[in-house]
Image: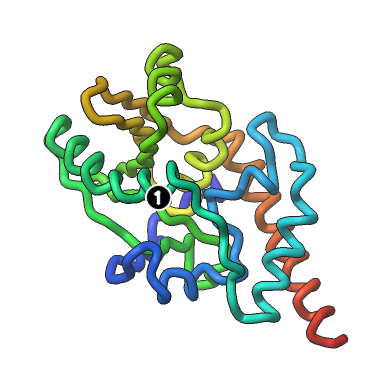
Amino acid sequence: MKGYRPMPIFSENTIQGNDIWFADRLGIPSSSRFNEILTATGIISKQRQKYLNELAGEKIVGVKPGSYKSAAMIRGAEMEAEARMVYAMEYEVDVKQVGVCFPDENRKYCSSPDGLVNNNGLIEIKCCTLPVAVEYLLKGKLPTIYYVQCQGQLLVTGRKWVDFFSYYPNLPSLTIRVEREPTFLSRLEEEIEKFSYELAILVNKLKAM
């Protein structure tokens, strides 16, 4: 399949959240927001133009606007290391932290998975609030809102699967393995390539003003 790239670029020396990490992602579409380009049902997102404008603005201004972080978001970030360790011990696997991943040297779009698992996998950690963690456990399936993100990570990294890992202390953890969906990946890659092309045109237009 066209979207499968066996030699992606991994920035393993970059710490997620630091200045270098933000600089690497500046003005580049990221898998965590691919759902603003294409929805899980395969239709164009209504947020597409807004996201396009945002990234073009970042390219011109040279900085990413500060974003609000709720108490739940801060807590989730702090708990991520613990969740990663629990997952590694539970499944007896090696989980390597990574900064920004790109599909190739063109670096037109990117992903920042929460870990590389052995040679073929990824992990996407969600340290949710207690009610949400319980909800995920009861449903026992991948929340639809994360489908595009997970498939996007597989598109960027070329890996075979990603484990969606929901974690809350003293609750059973939930692991949902998400494998590559070739049809959706082809559609996603096509739309991201179009989006990246339009982004480049918009940036040049703004520079000429």
Which residue matches tag 1? 74
Indicate the position of residue 137 as horizontal and vertical percent values.
Answer: 38, 17
In the image, is 123 to the left or to the right of 49? Answer: left
Q: How many marks?
A: 1
Can you name the residue that lies furthest to the right here? 209
Residue at image location 47% in from the left, 70% down from the top: 22
- Secondary structure under the numbered disc 1 in the rendered image: helix
- Mark 1 Cα shell of 10 Å, populated few (<14), some (14-19), many (≥20): few
In the image, is 145 to the left or to the right of 165? Answer: right
Can you name the residue that lies furthest to the front here? 71
Q: Quadrant of residue 134?
A: top left
Indicate the position of residue 114 as horizontal and vertical percent values.
Answer: 34, 49
Whether residue 162 is visible: no
Whether residue 129 is visible: yes
* Vertical placement of residue 120 versus 60, above or below: above
* Vertical placement of residue 78 versus 86, above or below: below
Which amino acid, by three-letter code, is at mark 1? Ile
Residue at image location 47% in from the left, 25% down from the top: 142
Indicate the position of residue 106 as horizontal and vertical percent values.
Answer: 54, 72
Indicate the position of residue 206 as horizontal and vertical percent values.
Answer: 81, 80
The quadrant the C terminus occupies is bottom right
Residue at image location 61% in from the left, 42% down from the top: 186
Q: Quadrant of residue 79?
A: top left
